[in-house]
């Protein structure tokens, strides 16, 4: 177990992507756990998915009445980022702002270059020129591409991305390593595995399936259902992020007198891949229990098994041993518990069947 070397009490923390799924949950958790913390949130609130959900998340944070400042801005705009760092001087930075999604990167690559590469570069440069104690940033299980070896370990070679999204996330890790080496910036990358939960992203499969089933449409299950995903409940992701924030990789010099990069990468996943068909069955049961779908819903007539699509991989599976060893934590929320929480939120937000 590592020893925490950063106290968040009395600190200013910058969270980019603060209106996002993980970002908003992280901000709420920080305010719940930490006294006298100031959180600066930045988000461009793009219309990649329903902005009403993003605004709803921000309203929840506003209602807490804590030391919270929200800035609508794009991390790809260097002046915006420089101004934020100059004015608020964050001690800890959590970069969650990114253009997400594998398939969208095929149709709209520009968004990924702007946010994930230029935006991340701006964050690194700002950290370089300010006294930042720790940079924590989101990577993705997508960096593993079509690796055959499972579970995926952070020691594995990840040089064969199968989507531009994956390539940008691998690039983030490389850029962070270079800045850690050159400027002694403590940085930790977190490879998230298929995050889900209440008020999540509508472009994710579980949310999209729910919308279609509710509308009586047919859902497509890729690779004929022979996909496995390491589904990770959002509260588990946030728990991991909060723990990691409090331990910056130690600064030390090598035999040549030059800094050894204070740099780490961890997987945060459930370490328990679920078959997509089993996942869909549990989702259906919980949607019926939450009265999002009627009890007699004819599920079989609303599903279609189709081939794999470009950019997808057949399995994701996180080796979380380093996270357990260093932070004493392993995600453990069961799929049923997590999907029940989502279904109950969905029923409350969108309404139940008549």
Image (cartoon, grey):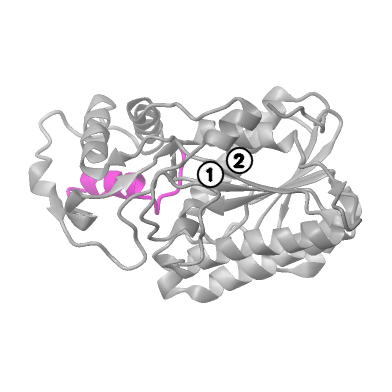
Q: CA distance from mark 2 to mark 1?
A: 6 Å
Q: Say what secondary structure mark 1 lies in.
A: helix
> Is 85 contained in the magenta span?
no
Examine the rendering and report whether any part of residue 75 can be seen: no
Q: Position of residue 294 (x, y in %)?
A: 17, 32
Q: How crowded is the residue under tag 1: few (<14 C-alpha within 10 Å), some, or many (20+)?
A: many
Does residue 128 appear left or right of residue 48 in this picture?
right
Q: Position of residue 324 (x, y in %)?
A: 57, 29
- Say which quadrant the C terminus sits in: top left
Residue drawn at the location 52% of the way across and 31% of the way down:
236
Q: Please name the residue that numbered disc 2 is placed on.
A: 24
Q: Is residue 293 above or below residue 201?
A: above
Residue drawn at the location 39% of the way across and 33% of the way down:
342
Q: Please name the residue that numbered disc 1 is placed on.
A: 21
* Residue 343 location, quadrant: top left
Which residue range is magenta in the image? 198-218
Q: Position of residue 91 (x, y in %)?
A: 84, 43
* Residue 38 location, quadrant: top right
């Amino acid at each position: 177990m590592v020893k925490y070397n950063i106290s968040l009490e009395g600190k200013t923390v910058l969270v980019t992507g603060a209106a996002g799924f993980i970002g908003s949950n992280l901000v709420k958790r920080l305010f719940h756990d930490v006294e006298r913390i100031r959180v600066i949130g930045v988000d461009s609130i793009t219309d990649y998915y329903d902005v009403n959900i993003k605004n709803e998340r921000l309203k929840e944070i506003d209602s807490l009445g804590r030391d919270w400042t929200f800035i609508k801005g794009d991390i790809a705009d260097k002046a915006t980022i420089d101004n934020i760092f100059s004015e608020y001087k964050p001690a800890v930075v959590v970069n969650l702002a990114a253009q997400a999604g594998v398939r969208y990167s095929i149709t709209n690559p520009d968004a990924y270059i702007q946010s994930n590469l230029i935006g991340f570069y701006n964050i690194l440069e700002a950290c370089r020129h300010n006294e930042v104690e720790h940079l924590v940033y989101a990577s993705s299980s997508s960096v593993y591409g079509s690796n055959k070896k499972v579970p995926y370990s952070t020691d594995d070679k990840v040089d064969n991305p199968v989507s531009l999204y994956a390539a940008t996330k691998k690039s983030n890790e490389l850029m962070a390593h270079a800045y850690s080496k050159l400027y002694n910036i403590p940085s930790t990358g977190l490879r998230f595995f298929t995050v889900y939960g209440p008020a999540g992203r509508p472009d994710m499969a579980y949310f999209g399936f729910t919308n279609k089933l509710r509308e009586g449409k047919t859902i497509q299950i890729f690779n004929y259902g022979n996909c496995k995903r390491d589904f990770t409940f959002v509260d588990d992701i946030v728990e991991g992020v909060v723990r990691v924030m409090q331990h910056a990789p130690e600064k030390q010099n090598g035999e040549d007198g030059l800094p050894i990069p204070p740099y780490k990468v961890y997987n945060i996943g459930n370490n328990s891949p679920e078959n997509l068909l089993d996942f869909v069955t549990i989702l259906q049961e919980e949607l019926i229990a939450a009265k999002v779908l009627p009890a007699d819903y004819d599920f079989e007539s609303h599903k279609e098994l189709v081939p794999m699509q470009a950019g997808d991989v057949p399995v994701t599976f996180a080796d979380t041993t380093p996270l357990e060893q260093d932070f004493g934590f392993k995600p453990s929320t069961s799929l049923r518990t997590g999907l029940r929480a989502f279904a109950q939120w969905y029923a409350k937000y969108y309404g139940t069947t008549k």
